[in-house]
Image: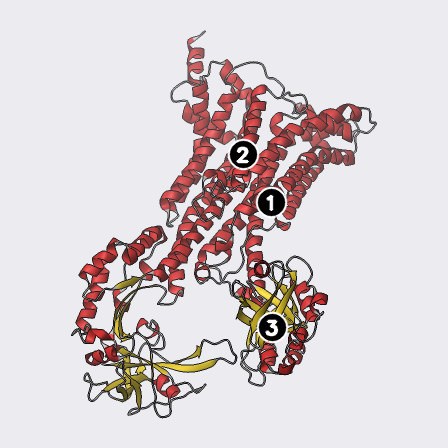
Amino acid sequence: MADGERRETARTAPGARGAAAPWVRARLRTSAAGSLAMGLLVLVTAFLAAAVPRQTAAQEDEELRQALAGASLERRSVTVTADVHHVAVRDGYRLPGPAALEEGARALRDAARPPLAPDRDRAVNGIRTKEPVTVDGHGLPRPSGIDPQLTLHTAPLQAERHLRLVSGRMPSPTVREDTVEAVVTERTAKTMNLKTGSTVVFPDVTGTPVTVRVSGVAAPRDPDSAHWRIETDLLEPSLRAVPTKMPPPLEYWHFTALIDSGAREVLLRCDGGAAIYGHHPLRVGDVAAANASALLAALVSLSSGADEARLRDRSPLPDPDVDADGPAGLLEAFEQERATSRALVTTAVVGVGTAAAVVLVLAGVLTVTARRPELELLRARGGSLPGIGLRLLGETSAVAVPPAAALLWVPAPGVAASLAMGAAVALAACLTLPLLAVAAHRRPGPPVRGDVAAARPSRRRTVAELTVVALASGGLVAVRRGTGAGPGAGTAVDPLTAAAPVLPAVVAAVVLLRVYPLPLRLSARPAARLRGLVLPLALARLGRAPAASVLPLLAMVVALTVSAFGGSVLAGVTAGRAHAALAEVGADARVEVPGVFPEDLEERLRRVEGVSGTSAVRIENGRSLKGVRAAPFALVAVDPETYARLTARTGLDGDGPFPAGELGRAGGEGAAVPAVVSPGLAEALGEGGEAEVDAVVGDTPLRAVAVRGRTPAVTGEFAVVSSAAFAGAHPDRRGSHALRPTTVLVSGTGLDGRALRAAAGEDGEDVAVTVRAEREAGYESGPLQDGTRLVHAAAVAAGIGYGALALLLWLLQSAPGRRTLLARLRAMGASRGRGRALVWAETLPLAVLGVVGGAVAAPATVALLRPGVDLTPLAFTAQVRAAGEETVRAALVPDAGSLVWPSLLLLALTCVVAAVQAGTGGVREEAERLRTGERE
C-alpha cells in the first residue's frame, strides 16, 4: 500500500485520533434537519422534565402559606393557657401582671425550636374569666327572656395602639366597693344598649354582687388584627343558643368588656376563676413546604414533648398548657394533600417519561436501520465497537447537550431536582443511539431480513416478554391489593405504584406485538388469490416490514393510557366535588327555616324560574330509640310521592327506588308508623324492626319497612316516615309547630340563588338557602390542586404528542420506499386512486391496532387502579378537609373524552400523512425516481 493511501486510511479509520470532530461536523451537516428535530425533541422533553419539580416546589410553598393565611388566627396559633381557680385567693396567689405575661411569651419563643417561629408582633397575651358570668342591668337585651352573659378581659398591652376612646375614659386600675370599671367597643355598646356610666351586676363565688361600670366607649384602631379577632366576641357581641331539643331555640347575648390590668384580681372572684392566655400566630411568610414535616414535629414537641417540659420549667405562669392542634391539623392536612399531589404528579411524569423513552428508542432504532450500510462499512474497515460508539456519542451529545444545558438559564426554585431531571433526559438522548448501534453490530455478518410476518421470536425474546408481563401483572395485583402506596394514598409513592398506569399499557403492547404478525401470515395466502391490487400488495408490504416498524404500537398504547388516566384524574376531582355538594345539599337547592314554617313558602319557591319540583320535609336531629342502644339519628317526615320523585332525580336512592307506597300504609292512632331506615338503625332495631322514637311531638312507635343506604334530606343515620302517618299517630297535635316542615328540598335546572333567596325571604322570614351549584363552586382550589391538575392536563397533551410523534417517525421513515413504490405503480399504469388506497391500506392497520390496544388498556388501567387512588386531597383543600367539610371520597372516574379524542387525533394524523404521501409528486418526479434507481 502506498504511503498516501496509508495516511488517508489512518485519517479516516474509526479509531484514529483527531477524527471525531470532523466526523461529528460532517454528520451534523449531512443530516441538519434530523439533528435539529432531535435537538428540539430533547429541548421540549428536558423542559417538561425540569419544569415539574420547579413548579411543584413553588406550588407547595404557596399552598402551605395560603392554607395558613386563609385559616382563622386561632387555628394557626400556638395557644398557651393557665387556669387559676378562685380558691387561689385564699392561698395568697396573685395573677401575673403585664411583665410576667411578656416573660411567659418570651419563654414560649425560646422553647420553640426551628423552624417553628411564632410571630412576636402579633402575639396576644391577657387574662379573662374562664367562664362567662350572667349579668343583670337596666336596658340589656333579652331576646328569649334570658339574661346576657359577660366575659371580662384585661386590656391589651399598649392599649393606645389598638383602641381609641370615643367617649369617657380608660378604666381605673383599682376596685372600689366591689365596683370595677371597664370599657366596651362601639359595636358592643350599640347592641347591648350601653353607654358611659352604665352598670351591670353579677354575683361572685360568695354571692356578693360585683358591679361593672362602663367608664368609656372605645373604637378599635385595627379591627382586623389578632388583638381583636383571636378572642371571641371581643370586638362585638354574639347571639348564642341554649342547647335544647324543643324548637324554637332559646337565645341570649354574650359580650365582652375590658378592665385595667391593675384590677385583674377581680377575675378570681368569678365562678370558674381566671384563665391566663397567650396566642402566638405562626409567621406565614417564613413557612416553607420543605420544612413542613420539621415544623409539625416542633409543634408536637412543644405541645406534648420535650419542648413542653422545658417551657413549664421556664415559664412564670402556673402549670401552662400548650395547644397546637390548630396549626398541627393544618399541617397534617397539607402533608396528606402534598403526598397525594406528589404521587399523582409522579404517575403522570412516569407515564409521559415512558412515552418519551419509547420515542427516543424508536428514533434510535430507525436511525440505526437507516445507517446500517454505513456502520457495517466501518466495521468492515476495522472499526471497533467502542470507537463507533464514541463517534455516535459525539454526534448525539452535540445535538442533545446544548438544549438540555439551556435550562440552566431559566431561573426558578427547585434547581437541584430540575437539573437532575434535565440531565437524565440529556443522558438518555445521548446514549440511546450508541447503545443500539453497538448492540446491532456487535457481530459483523451479512444483513438478515427481519420481516414482521416471517420472523420467529427467539427464546430470549419469549423469556423477556414473559418476564415483563409477569412483573407488570404482579405489580398491578400489588397496587390493587394495597401492597404499594398507591397513587394518592397519602404516603410516599414508590416506583412500582408510580408506574402503575403504564403497566397495563406495557402488557397490552407486548401482547399486540406478539399477536400482530399472526393475521398477516394467515391472510397473506388467501389475499394473493384476489384479483385486486391494493389488498394483496398492502398485506405483502406489511408482512415484509422490518420488526422495528411495530414499535409505534407501544408508544401509542402508552400515550393513550396516560391520556386516559390523566383525564380520569381530572374527571374524578370534578365528580367528587359534585357528589359532595349533592350529599350536603340533598337536592338542587335547600331552604331551611329555623323558626315558624310559612304556609305559602313552597308555592313561592315553585314560581321561581327553573324550579321543577319541591318537597317539604321535617327534620329532627339527635333522636334516639327507647329501650334500644343505637346511635343518634335524624327523624325525617316527608310526603312520600314528592320525596320519591326527588330521590329518583338526585340519584340518592340508595339500594333501590324510594318505597313511597309502603310509607303510605299507616295503621292509624296507636299503630307503628312505617319508616325507611338506614343500615345502622336497621341493625339496632333487630329482627322485630319496631321501637319508639323520642320525637318532639311525643313518643312515636316506628316500624322499619325498608332499608336504604342514603337519603337526600340528611346524611348519617336516619328514619324517614310519612308526614301524614306521623301526624295520624298524634291526632291531638294536628297543625301544631311540632308537626310542621322545617326544610324544603328544591329540584330544577339553572337555579338562581338570588331568586330563591328573594322568594324564600320576601316576607322577612329567617331562612337559609343553599344552592348545590354554589356549594360545588365553593370547594375552592388551592395552588397545589390547580398545579396537579395542570400537570395531568399537560401529561395528557404530552402523551398524545409523543404518541403522534412516534407514529409520524414511522410514517416518515417509510415514506421514501412508499413513494418509490407509487412511482413504479404509476409507470405500470396504476391509477392515482389505487395508489392512495394502497398507502391507506398500508398505514392504517398499525394505527388502528394501536388505538384498539389503548382502548383496551386505558379502561382496564382506570378499573384496576380505582380502589387504590384517593383523589379526596386533590378535590378539597387542606383547609376544607381539616374542618371536616367534605362528605364523600373522590376516586377515579372513566373519562371517554380523554380516550376518544386522542384516538381520533392519531387516526386523523395517519390519514393526513398518508394522503400527503399519496398525493405528492407528478409524472416528472416519478420518472426521476425510476431513473435514479431509488430503492427502499
Query: For mark 3, does the 10 Å Cα neighbourhood hold few (<14), some (14 to 19), or many (20 or more) residues?
Result: many
Q: Are marks 3 and 2 in contact (CB under 8 Å)?
A: no
Q: Position of residue 841 (x, y in %)?
A: 73, 34
Residue 830 is tagged as: none
SS class, disc 1: helix
Residue labelled with disc 2? 474
Residue drawn at x 42%, y 47% is 53
Q: CA distance from mark 3 to mark 1?
A: 47 Å
Q: CA distance from mark 3 to mark 2?
A: 57 Å
Image location (x, y in percent) of residue 122:
28, 68
Q: Residue at x 60, y 70 (%)?
A: 636
Q: Hey, which residue is sitting farthest right in the picture?
A: 531
Q: Nearer the viewer, residue 527 or 470?
A: 470
Against 373, residue 302 (above or below) is below
Task: Please give the residue where the numbered disc 1 appears in the rendered image.
Answer: 863
**Residue 255 as seen in the image, left or right of residue 29:** left
The amino acid on which the numbered mark 3 sits, given as a three-letter code, is Thr
Res 611 quadrant in image: bottom right
Q: Quadrant of the N terminus?
A: top left
Tell me the kind of residue under disc 2.
Answer: Gly
The residue identified by callout 3 is: 700
Query: Which of the image's four quarters has the C terminus?
Result: top right
User: In this orientation, which residue lies closer to the viewer: 495 or 247?
Assistant: 247
Side of 258 where 809 appears, left or right:
right
